[in-house]
Structures are given as structure tokens and as C-alpha cells.
Image (tube, helix red, strand yellow):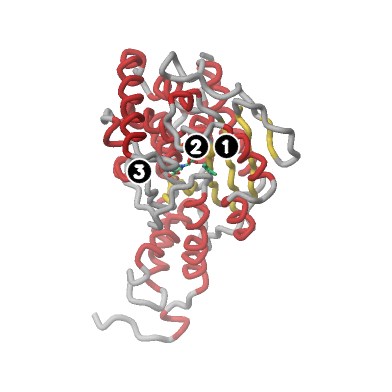
Amino acid sequence: MNVEHEFWRTPAAAPDAAWRERARARQDELTKPAGSLGRLEELAIFMAAAQGCDRPAVERVNIAVFVADHGIAAAGVSAFPQAVTVQMISNLAHGGAAISVLAKQLAADMEIINLGTAVAAPALVNVRDAVIAAGTASFLHGPAMTAAQYRQALAAGRDAAARAQAAGCQLFIGGEVGIANTTAAAAVACALLDEAPVRLAGPGTGLDRDGLQHKVDVLEQALAQHRDALVDADAILQYLGGFEIVALTGAYVHCAQQGLPVLIDGYISSIAALAAARLCAGADHWFLYGHNSAEPGHARVLATLAGRPLLDLDMRLGEGSGAATAVPLLRLACALHNDMATFAEAEIAGRCD
Ligand SMILES: O=C(O)c1ccc[n+]([C@@H]2O[C@H](COP(=O)([O-])O)[C@@H](O)[C@H]2O)c1
Ligand SMILES: Cc1cc2nc[nH]c2cc1C
């Protein structure tokens, strides 16, 4: 591996403490009892520190949806057939996917990035071709991807984040689609957290009880088989991850290194965020968490990241949909911070003490 090009090893600096303190002082001057806007105050303070300014904004949002297939799908671990992944590329491109609708409502820029499906996707003008292979290999039979493919997937994510930043984006959202990716993500999380599959695997797209038991069995078998190889986060992602999971990881690392705040989506995205924090010291300082996924293992992953999701709507779709749904809250938090009158401006009496 060429050490010079291992961008994911460079630590991320923390958001600016001086701007954070200035924003906190402003919040205390606004016409409300201090702290009465609760976490909306914290959100605005975070954005002011992240953007290094006293009037933060979340108008320009970029959503990058990474799509890839998974060899582990052949083990029967999803409620849906693998063909859905490639079919969803067309749906995303034609505006029919949930995230397409949300992106339009938010006036967000959306990129669809094809990292490789079992059946090749049709060429579509608004789908970026970043195909690495026709999906990963099954991690029941060997590593999910080669070391070269791992680096390629990280770089695909980094490049998407770099394009977003070059376009002036103020908030980055990563989304994913990939049948069976809750199994790959669970495998990565089990290895990173040294947890048993029964604690982190869930129904995904809708497995029944027997289906979930089979998924747990598959995960136990794979983790036992690769135990000696899973020496660090790089090996864990290479052996057990998926192209879209690794691309999300690369995108989050780059955002953090460039000081671009990220709104993390659900189960798969949060596991990529955990991996990013393991690869790149300080990356998680730049992460906000959009929602609490209904996938049961999500809470355990968020607890490790000390992430407090903004919404709890029983969503479990992926695509970036939970994060996108939380964007209006961030916008409102910034509007309150920027536009409310201070006590002095409104000539309102302050606290008695
Ligand atoms: O993001 C989540 O919390 C989430 C939870 C469950 C399922 N998903 C989506 O469902 C797909 C994976 O589910 P599965 O059952 O095929 O592993 C994949 O396309 C994900 O985007 C996403
Ligand atoms: C239809 C469908 C849409 C999705 N979007 C993300 N994961 C998905 C899984 C399915 C099955």
C-alpha cells in the first residue's frame, strides 16, 4: 500500500472553539430564557463552530447516494432479491426513490454513484459510473474485496465529498442502497465493537424470526472464519464491508478533514461513521446524527459514537432518507440563531439575578 495516498490516516482538526464560544454567548443574549430552545441551540452552536462564522447556514446541502451489490446476498440474508439494487438505480435517477423526493423538497444537490451491481446498470445521464466490480464477493468464502478494491472504494467516497465541497456545500449527507448491506454492516460493527451478531443484527428490509436467526448464524460463521485477519479497521472493512459502506467511510473522513459537517443517516451509515472515526482520529467531531433507525443494533452503534439522533420516526429505509428528513430542523436552528432579536435590541428585561 502506498502510504502517501492513505488519506484516511490524516487526523481531522476539531471545529473552532472560539467561534463555538461566540455562538454560545449569542444564544444567551437572544430573547428567551437561556437554554429554552434546547438542542436547537446546540445545533446552531455546532454549525457556527463548524463553519467558523457567526451566522451559520444550511442552505446548500449535498446528498451522495452510493449503490453497490453484496456477495453475501447469495446466503439468503435479505427479504428482497439482489435485483432490487440495480433496479433502484433507475428509480433514483428518475426521481421516484424516497431520497429523490426529499432532495427535491430540500432543494439539495443529489449524486447517484454506482459502485457496482451484479447485473450491470443501464447508462443513465445522472448516474456516476464508479464501478469497482459486479458487487463484492461473499465474505463466507473469502474477503469481500481485495485491498485494491478497498482503496478504490475509499477514494470514490473521498471524491464525492470533494465534489460536494467544491460546489460550495454546507452540509454533506451520505446515502446508500445495497441489498444485504445490513448483513455486511452488522459484520463490520461486530468486528469493530467486539460484539456478538445477536446484539447487532436485525431484520433489515423485513426478515422474519427464522430469517433473522439465519442471518445471525451466517454472521457468526463469517466472523469466526476471518477472526485472525480482522486485525484493524482497514482489514475489517476489506474483509466484511461493501463498496458503498467503504465509500461512505471515505466520504466522511474527507468531510471531517476538510471541515465540512456531515449529517449521518441510519444503521449502515452510522457503522460507516464508526469506521471513519476509527480510521481518522477526530473525524466524529464533524458528525451530526439525523435519526434513530428502527434497525435494533443502531442504538448500540450510536452509543459508541456518543451520537444523539435528531429524529425518532421508526424509519429504516437508508438512502440518506432519515438524515434528509432532519435537515429542516437544522435550517430552523440556524434561522433562530441568526434572526432572533437580542434582549438589548428588543429592549426586554433580562433575568432578575
Ligand atoms: O439505514 C437503515 O437504517 C436501514 C435499515 C434497514 C434497511 N436499510 C436499507 O435496506 C437495504 C438493506 O437491507 P437488507 O435487509 O437487504 O440487508 C439497503 O438498501 C439499505 O439502504 C437501511
Ligand atoms: C424497494 C427498496 C428500496 C430501498 N432503498 C434502500 N433500500 C431499499 C430496499 C428496497 C427493497
Q: Quick check: 123 left or right of 224?
A: right
Q: Amino acid at mark 3?
A: His
Q: Amino acid at mark 1?
A: Val
To which residue does mark 1 refer? 84
Q: Quadrant of residue 202?
A: top left
The numbered dot on residue 80 is: 2
Can you give x and y, in whole percent of width and height, for residue 215 in the image? 36, 30
Instruction: Give whichever of 117, 57 is nearer the camera.
Output: 117
The answer for how far apart the CA atoms under marks 1 and 3 are is 23 Å
Q: Is mark 1 within 8 Å of ligand 2?
A: yes
The numbered dot on residue 307 is: none
Residue at position x 39%, y 58% from top? 21
Q: Is mark 2 within 8 Å of ligand 2?
A: yes
Can you give x and y, in whole percent of width and height, for residue 139 in the image? 43, 19
Can you give x and y, in whole percent of width and height, for residue 324 in the image? 52, 54
Q: Quadrant of residue 106?
A: bottom right
Question: Residue placed farthest to the left in the image?
Answer: 353
Q: Amino acid at mark 2?
A: Phe
- Characterize the local packing of mark 1: few (<14), some (14-19) or many (20 or more) Cα atoms within 10 angstroms: some
Q: Secondary structure beneath disc 3?
A: helix
To which residue does mark 3 refer? 298
Q: Is mark 3 within 8 Å of ligand 1?
A: yes
Tag 2–tag 1 contact (CB < 8 Å): yes
